[in-house]
Image (spheres, grey):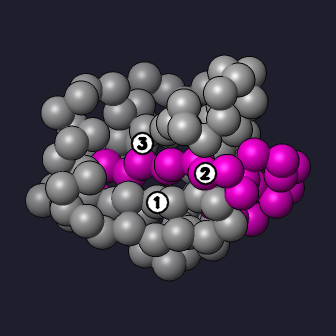
């Protein structure tokens, strides 16, 4: 689980991040990046979304969210988040292609998306 200071919870923050239209896609996962930080001390907030249109079963959607969240948490812990800490907020959106993938596959996808930033 991500520490509370790194979680994106507010609906307005999600909308603001989507409005920037700075996105990257790979392997069924899309990464939306918000505005750049004015001060580097502010923590980057991260959200994880899997829509009901992706799969009707909540178990499948929640598993994909857990995999993305854990992959990001491990990368954050090891300090291999590349340029992602320059942004105010990040949103990972899971798609249909990512549903059946393993933890290692999701982790490489998340890592490559962060490197694209």
Q: Is residue 93 magenta?
A: yes
* Residue 73 can be seen, yes or no: no
Q: Secondary structure at mark 2?
A: loop
Q: Measure the C-alpha gap from mark 2 to mark 1.
A: 11 Å
* Residue 87 can be seen, yes or no: yes
Name the N-terminal-most of marks 2 and 1.
Answer: 1
- Tell whether 106 sits left or right of 26: right
- Residue 46 in the image: above or below residue 29: above
Q: Nearer the viewer, residue 60 or 106?
A: 60
Q: Measure the C-alpha gap from mark 1 to mark 3.
A: 10 Å
Q: Tag on residue 109?
A: none
Residue at the spot of label 2: 95
How many residues crowd around disc 3 within 10 Å: few (fewer than 14), some, or many (20 or more)? Answer: many
Residue 111's x, y, as percent? 64, 65
Q: Nearer the viewer, residue 39 or 35?
A: 35
Residue at the spot of label 1: 31
Q: Look at the image and give the residue range highlighted in magenta.
A: 87-110
Residue 117's x, y, as percent? 43, 74
- Residue 103 in the image: above or below residue 107: above
Spot the residue most to the left.
38
Q: Secondary structure at mark 1?
A: strand
Q: Which picture quadrant has residue 13?
A: top left
Residue 17's x, y, as percent? 25, 51
Residue at the spot of label 3: 46
- Tell whether 25 sits left or right of 4: right
How many residues crowd around disc 1 within 10 Å: few (fewer than 14), some, or many (20 or more)? Answer: many
């Amino acid at each position: 689980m991500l520490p509370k200071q790194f979680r994106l919870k507010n609906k307005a923050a999600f909308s603001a991040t989507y409005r920037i239209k700075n996105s990257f896609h790979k392997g069924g996962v899309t990464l939306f990046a918000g505005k750049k930080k004015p001060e580097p001390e502010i923590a980057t907030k991260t959200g994880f979304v899997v829509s009901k249109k992706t799969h009707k079963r909540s178990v499948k959607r929640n598993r994909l969210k857990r995999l993305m969240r854990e992959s990001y948490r491990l990368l954050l812990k090891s300090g291999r988040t590349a340029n992602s800490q320059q942004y105010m907020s990040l949103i990972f959106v899971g798609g249909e292609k990512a549903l059946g993938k393993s933890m290692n596959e999701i982790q490489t996808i998340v890592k490559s998306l962060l490197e694209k930033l």
